[in-house]
Structures are given as C-alpha cells and as structure tokens.
Amino acid sequence: MVLGLLRSVRSDERSGGDQRVSEAGFHASLPDPAISSACRRNRFVTGDRVCWAGMSSMMGIVFTEFFDMVEHRHGLRMSEQLLDAVAPANEGAYTAVGNYDHQDMMRYVAELARDTGRSVDMILAEFGEYLFEVFVRRYPGLIESAGSAIEFLGSVEAFIHVEVVKLYPDAELPHFEYPVREQGRLVMVYRSSRWLAPFALGLIRGCIAHFGDALEVRMTDLSEQGTRARFEITPVA
Ligand code: HEM
C-alpha cells in the first residue's frame, strides 16, 4: 500500500505530471562550527555508522533513485521491507523535486545494509556509483562538458555543483578542495555537515567507469566525525 503510493507518485512524475510536493525542509544554512555542535547533539547510530539526525533535508531525486536501485537490484519486496521498517512520515510518497528528511535516507541505507549483510559504507558507495549513471542520462550536457574523468572531477566544486544549485536551489552540497591537480592525478578533499564520503567515493568510481579511464581512487577518512575525507585519484598501478 505504502509502496503503491510511492510508485504512483513517481510514475506521475515520469509521465510529465507537475506534482511538486515541497515538504517542510529544514536547511542547514548555519556556519560550520554551529553545524558541528548541533550535529553532536543529534548523533545516532545506524548499523556500523554514526549519522547526524534532525539537521537537514535531502533532494527527492536521491530518494526516488535510491528506490529505483533497490527495486532493480533487490526487487519490489525489498523496497516494501525498507518502507515498512522506516515508516516515513510521508508514507513513501517521494518525488524528485521534493525535499525530505536526510535522516530517513540514512535509515533506509542502514536497513538495506542489515537485510543484505553488507556495511552502510558499501551501500552508500554502490548507490553513488549507480547515481552517476543516472546523472549521465539526466544531464548529458553537464557530463559532456569534460573530456576525461579527471577533468570532470576537477570541475565538481566550481562548475558541476554550481550548475546543480541553479537546477535545485534547495540542494545541500558538500565542498571540495583540490590540493593536488597534476597531469593524470587529482586529490579532492571532501567536507560536509553529513557523513556521505562513501557516497562521494561511489560517484567518483561511477565517473571513472563512465569515462573508461585507467584510474583508481583511494579514500582516507580525515575526521573522527567522518565529515572530511581525502580522495586520491591516480593512474592504475
Ligand atoms: C553531473 C554530475 C552531478 C550532479 C548532477 C550532482 C548533483 C547533486 C545533487 C542534486 C545533490 C544534492 C542532494 C541533496 O540535496 O541532498 C548532490 C549532493 C552530493 N554530491 Fe553531487 N552531483 C554530481 C556530481 C558529483 C560528483 C562527481 C561527486 C563526487 C566527487 C559528487 C558528490 C556529492 C556528494 C557527496 C553529495 C551529498 C551531499 C553531502 O555530502 O553533503 N557529486 N549532488
């Protein structure tokens, strides 16, 4: 029943319906130190990962694509199980243009990890990889703006996410710094109020796979809270 609702709203959207469910999204527009102290008060643990609760909203496209991935890879039954276990306030009525509780997404990920016997980090990375291919289909112009994975990844902060904000003004995006930019090698440092570095790892892997470049990526967690991470992208040894 809940899933039926989810599916009907999403198919409306696919058929061009203009159903703009804009929920009361809470946007964390606080300066970093304020985010950190508020986050510390709102910590909760899902499976093997500490997450931040009650702080921020997340784009509906992330939810709709997450459920597409789950249905595709694990079947409809698994989607139903996740919705039943999490019991979201909106009963699973997600649209790509809405904004929803980030905490619910972390709960779905934790449930899927539990049900499939994998870690939360693995699920987030797999989802990131999946989502990159979705982006390729949805935003071919953005992807074709670069000729290689390194060129594309090097433009995420100054160009890609800037364009994303034009499309989705409510999007909450991470920040990337680039301490090393060399021919064939790139270092990206991720910073966010959310622990989604493994998701970034998946997006980077998806990007490398899409461009077909002989590159590998290594992630190092830089903070105890898991809100900073370093990604080193180098030629395959
Ligand atoms: C065409 C390419 C891309 C598009 C269209 C895109 C779009 C988006 C959107 C809409 C969100 C907002 C989700 C929300 O509101 O919660 C987001 C978040 C995010 N993006 Fe991108 N993105 C792209 C490429 C990348 C790449 C290559 C990376 C990794 C290097 C990346 C890393 C992230 C991360 C980690 C988040 C989660 C938010 C956080 O950690 O604070 N994105 N992206």
Image (cartoon, helix red, strand yellow):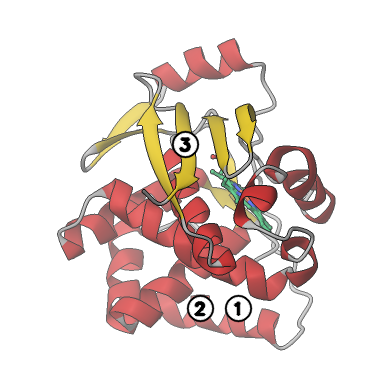
> In which quadrant of the rendered view does residue 94 lie?
bottom right
Q: Is mark 3 within 8 Å of ligand 1?
A: no
The answer to whether residue 38 is left or right of residue 219 is right
Furthest residue to the right?
166
Position of residue 59 relative to residue 175, above or below, is below
> Disc 3 vs disc 2: Cβ atoms closer than 8 Å?
no
Quarter assignment of residue 183: top right
Q: Position of residue 8 (x, y in %)?
A: 56, 84
Q: Position of residue 225 (x, y in %)?
A: 38, 22
Of all residues shown, which one is farthest toward the left?
Answer: 117
Q: Residue furthest bottom?
A: 15
Task: Specify the label residue 9 is tagged with.
Answer: 1
Residue occupying the point 47% across, 43% down: 234
Contact, mark 2 vs mark 1 (Cβ under 8 Å): yes
Residue at image coords 46%, 22%: 39
Pick the residue in front: 235 or 100: 235
Q: Is residue 130 left or right of residue 116?
A: right
Q: Residues within 10 Å of mark 2 (few under 14, many from 20)?
A: some
Picture coordinates of residue 73 (x, y %)? 33, 78
- Which sits earlier in the primary sequence, circle 3 or circle 2? 2
Kindly identify the residue that appears in the image at 24 percent across and 56 percent down: 113
The amino acid type found where label 2 is placed reads: Leu
Residue, disc 2: 5
Q: Nearer the viewer, mark 3 or mark 2?
A: 3
Helix, strand or loop for disc 1: helix
Identify residue for label 3: 232
What secondary structure is marked by label 3? strand
- 115 to 230, vertically: above or below: below
Indicate yes or no: mark 1 CB to ligand 1 under 8 Å. no
